[in-house]
Amino acid sequence: MRRAVTIEPHNIQIDATPPPSPASDEIAVRVECVGICGSDMHIYSGHHPTATFPRVQGHEVSATIESLGSNVAGTFVAGERVVIDPLVPCGACYACRIGRSNTCPTLKVIGAHRDGFLQEAIAVPAGNVHPAGTLSADEAVLTEPASVGLQAVRRGVVAAGEQVVIIGAGPIGLCTALAAIDAQARVLMIDTVPSRLDLAMSIGAERTILADSPQLDADILDWTDGDGPPVIIDCVGHPAVIRQCCRLVAPAGRVVIVGLSDKEVSLPIVDFTYKEMTIVGSRASAKLFPESVNLIERHREAYSRLITHRFPLGETGAALEFAIANPSAASKVIVEID
Ligand SMILES: [Zn+2]
Ligand SMILES: [Zn+2]
């Protein structure tokens, strides 16, 4: 079977290995589609803090069942389409014990810390495998980013009718918008790229603002009748954006930080006390894959708009180079394995 191995930064080679056979608690699957994510670009560029080489990348996948380990026989039917949660937590630490295994300090991510889905077949822990419901291979590959958006909306305790500002209209920002819309919230999106904001409107955002608009603060206050938004979700991870979130959020509001960065941010202490704002982080997702499949089933057409480009497995390197070089043209780039 063929696989795309990242040998070193900016160098992917296609090689061949024997197909995997599942251990007793594993399931072997045949990969259909793999989504390219921002973290894949970081690994490929050599900027990921904990990934090592050589590595088969890819953590967003749709697949079909090939064979089942002896302890999990009968849980799935051969050929059934599935989605796979890429997080492998320890299961024993404090975070894992209270159901927040996505923050496990020894978390292993398939595609970053162990080989991922950019190959024709793979064996994974059975507990990570979930039915894909009625989703197509294209729709199912969006389950992981959809779950990240769902986690962000849950962390922000977004309620029906609430006005939510989302900064960053890349795939994760758009998935966050769709999860908020599904929760019957009203969504305003901010980005630096006009075409991304067009995509945001096409999936149901109520309003958009260009990030460099001099009217930005005034427009947001106007949209919320002078209150400021009760919830702001950062999907950028830049210090200036975090400060913007804390400045704009309504008193007693919530700020959710999804964007990832190794930078530091300074904030006026008075906003913590006077505003009593709640600031929470949101990382990947915890046990949300079944709900995420249902979420995509309710909004198939909108999620499908996120996929803008496709490459075959043999051109995985080109797919990553393209995604890195074209952040405004490319939303979700997928690699088709067959
Ligand atoms: Zn991802
Ligand atoms: Zn743990």
Image (spheres, rainbow, N blue to C red):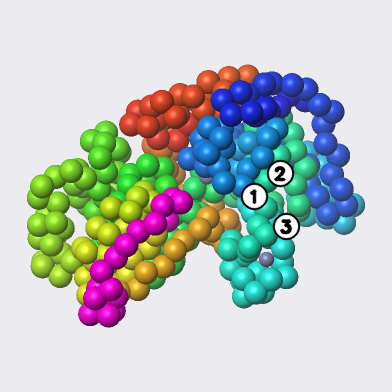
Q: Quadrant of the C terminus?
A: top right
Q: Earlier in the sequence, mark 2 or mark 1?
A: 1
Name which residue type carries label 1: Val
| Residue 114: image tag | 2
Q: Is residue 270 magenta?
A: yes
Q: What residue is at 14 percent from the left and 45 percent from the top?
A: 213
Residue 15 appears at what percent x and percent y?
A: 74, 21
Callout 2–callout 1 Cβ contact below 8 Å: yes
Q: Earlier in the sequence, mark 1 or mark 3?
A: 1
Residue on which disc 3 sits: 127
Could you tell me how far apart the alpha carbons at marks 1 and 3 are, in whole angstroms? 14 Å
In the foreground, 253 or 140 = 253
For the residue pair 159 and 245, the one nearer the viewer reads as 245
Rendered position, 186 above or below 254: above
Q: Main secondary structure of the magenta part?
A: loop
Pinpoint residue 3: horizontal percent, then vertical percent: 71, 27
279 on left or right of 54: left
User: Is residue 150 highlighted in magenta?
Assistant: no
**Image position, residue 299 (x, y; %):** 41, 48
Residue sitting nearer the eye, 261 or 64? 261
Relative height, residue 170 to residue 1 (above, below) = below
Which quarter of the rendering shows the N terminus? top right
Query: In the rendered structure, which amino acid carries the disc numbered 2?
Result: Arg
Give how far across and how far down residue 146 sits, in percent. Answer: 48, 50
Q: Which region shows up in magenta?
A: 258-276
